[in-house]
Amino acid sequence: MSNAAPIAPVADRSDAPLHVALIMDGNGRWAAARGLPRAEGHRRGVDALRRVVRAAHELGIGYLTIFSFSSENWSRPAAEIGDLFGLLRRFIRNDLASLHRDGVRVRVIGERDGLEPDICALLNEAEELTRNNSRLTLVVAFNYGSRQEIARAAQRLAREVAEGKRDPDTIDAEMLGQYLEAPDIPDPDLIIRTSGEQRLSNFLLWQAAYSELVFVPMHWPDFDKAALEGAIAEFARRERRFGGLVAKTAS
């Protein structure tokens, strides 16, 4: 995005998933395989993110969710956490203007309490500046954990019951889903994880109930438009029955 040409008009890709979510794994292993510091792997991972945001729109994807920082990532060494936060700062400061110019809307999910004030300010700025954009919605899962998200939703419902504002018999799966962080965003059709690991790692557990999962062996810094197209081709080969007997679309 920064110092790059504007996003090209979207092609007619009726077979593309509406919402793709990405677990961007393998930055450290990519760096280690090349004798480079982990920080360089994370930096190259940001380059990959730029490529993929551009490719997502070109391929007709409406929503792209990225798992940028997990609530469990706080257990990493302080220096690495500092590197990751520094990359987030630079990404927003350097790329936000071009994201806005290209019609990308930024949404942020995750717990903001306890984050450094300048990080919160940058996240708020990204959301406010791009609020009215509609070409692509980039959902940034930052300081995010799915179990924590579900627990917060349950707490809100329990509080309403305790205050006499809600009958507990009215609480069902649809209602709980409305109390998650971004209930207006459709569930992901496709979740891609790089680096060959095959697990969700506390990412969108509720929303992934009927998502197709594609695990690719390459590390995240090597991921590009061709890799995204390959994952979408695998998605297109699958039959999505959503618990029924006949394949149907997510819509």
Image: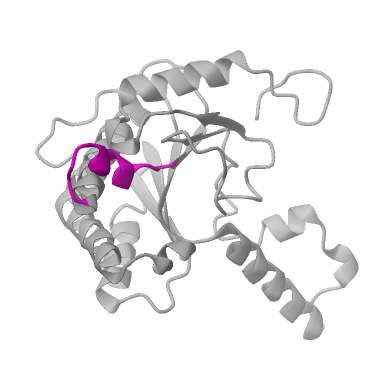
Queried whether the magenta region covers residue 31, the answer comes back as yes
Name the residue: 62% across, 61% down: 147
Quarter of the figure that contains the C terminus: top right
Looking at the rendering, which quadrant does residue 117 occupy? bottom left
Q: Residue furthest left?
A: 3
Queried whether the magenta region covers residue 84, the answer comes back as no
Left or right? Give the position of 238 relative to 222. Answer: right
Left or right? Give the position of 214 relative to 83. Answer: right
Name the residue: 86% across, 64% down: 170
Q: Residue furthest right?
A: 169
Pick the residue in front: 126 or 234.
234
Name the residue: 66% across, 68% down: 151
In the rendered structure, which segment of residues is drawn in magenta?
23-37
Looking at the rendering, which quadrant does residue 115 occupy? bottom left
Q: Is residue 189 above or below residue 112?
A: above
Quarter of the figure that contains the N terminus: top left
Name the residue: 68% across, 74% down: 156
